[in-house]
Image (spheres, rainbow, N blue to C red):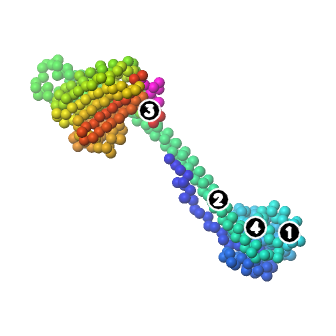
Amino acid sequence: MFRIEDFVDAAPARSRPSSVLIVDDDSSERIALRSMLAPLGHPVVEAETDLEARLCVRREDFAVILLDVRTPTMDGFATAAYIRSREQSKLTPLIFITTVDRAEKEMALGYAMGAVDFIVAPVVPAALRAKVSLFADLFEKTLELVEQTRRLRLAATRAAEAAGLEREMLDRMEELGRAKSDFVSTISHELRTPLTSVIGYVELLLDGGPGVPTAEQCRMLGIIDRNGKRLLTLIGDLLTMSRVDAGIFALQTGPVNLAEVVERVREVTEPAVATAGLELTIDLRGATDLVGDREQLERSILNLVSNAVKFSSPGGRVEIATRTDGDDVAISVHDTGSGIPADEQAQLFTRFFRATRTLEQQVPGTGLGLYIVSQIVELHGGAMDVVSSSAGSTFTMRVPIAGPPSDPLALVRGR
């Protein structure tokens, strides 16, 4: 995100002029004016002719210019016109000095040429100092506003350029993201087909189709079968992730008997639960029929139960519980494992994240399981929740009983 403030301070500040220029062909008048201005502390520069005045304003910026309008040797209005014609001095305060007999007819012309005020001779020192001080301060404030405007314009230009670059980068990232999703989808599909054949032939060998294998051969084939199925699951997860990211993962919705789904999960996980020395309990008092993708909901619950089994010690317990909560049904999986550190819980549903306990216990996995569960639940219009402590963890899926929103993928595309 780009802000104007990021660019404003980068612009160089313009120095503030403090000198006063006196333009008068009468040296005694210049001396008198200099003396009157001395208490203000402004440096004073004097010019006797129009040429000298022009050289002065080309050489230096002034806070105020005092200009005698009519003299025998110089036309003050011509000098004023030159000062106003220059970009650097077009805002410099011009105070014309005139006499009583010429004041009325010259004021209109003087203001039209950009004079900020007139002083009528004989000059009153206090009035002169007050006007010079006032217009010098106003000029400084004007320059500050001009400088700030310049900086803001520069900042706006740079911000617009940066925003354009940002949009270009985002477009490029989206393009790369689509290319990545297409690549993952293609590779996953190409790997899945031959791997399915490998697993099929391994099962055929284990069943003794070509001949009964020896005990050692059965052990080796069992290793191939387990790792092949593990790889097949990984490929399926990658394929699901790429489809969700690409916005093409569509739910196959219909009536779902939640009790049957949970029972199916129990049947599939029963061997792993028994091997791990755990107790699996089921509480279906809050079970209800709903509308959703039966296969994906079963996949999500199965994933949560499998994780619970992995991280529970022998003698522990895994519980699947359902309850109705307003318009939603909540499906919870509780384990009696060691829990998840509080600082890691917010990252559990991000891609490829693996908790510390996963690494410490060397539990195999890619960190995609919980991410895919969260995506499936979100596509149903629901949300995931986790509560964890040293006494165990509880993962809860909340999904609407009435079914997913009309365009569930909009939820993913909107993130």
**Which residue in the structure is indicated by mark 3?**
412
**Amino acid carrying mark 2 in the image:** Leu
Alpha carbon distance from label 2 to label 1: 33 Å
- Label 4 sits on a secondary structure element that is strand
- Residue 341 coordinates in the image, percent (x, y): 29, 43
Left or right relative to 373: residue 98: right
Which badge, 1 or 3, comes first in the chain's sequence? Answer: 1
Q: Position of residue 226 (x, y in %)?
A: 21, 29
Question: Vertically, is 255 above or below 13?
Answer: above
Alpha carbon of mark 4 to alpha carbon of mark 1: how far?
15 Å
- The magenta stretch is 403-411
Q: Residue 94, labelled with which disc? A: 4
Q: Is residue 46 left or right of residue 256?
A: right
Which residue is tagged 2?
145
Locate residue 315, reporting x and y percent. Answer: 16, 33
Secondary structure of the residue carrying tag 3 is helix
User: How far is the residue under mark 1 from the one under mark 3?
Assistant: 77 Å
> Which badge, 2 or 1, comes first in the chain's sequence?
1
Q: Give the mark toward the camera: 4 or 1.
A: 1
On screen, 135 above or below 408? below
Mark pair 4, 2: CA separation: 19 Å
Do we see residue 307 in this rendering?
Answer: yes
Quarter of the picture containing the C terminus is top left
| Secondary element at image label 1 | helix
Q: Residue at x 60, y 56 (%)?
A: 151
Q: Residue at x 20, y 22 (%)?
A: 203
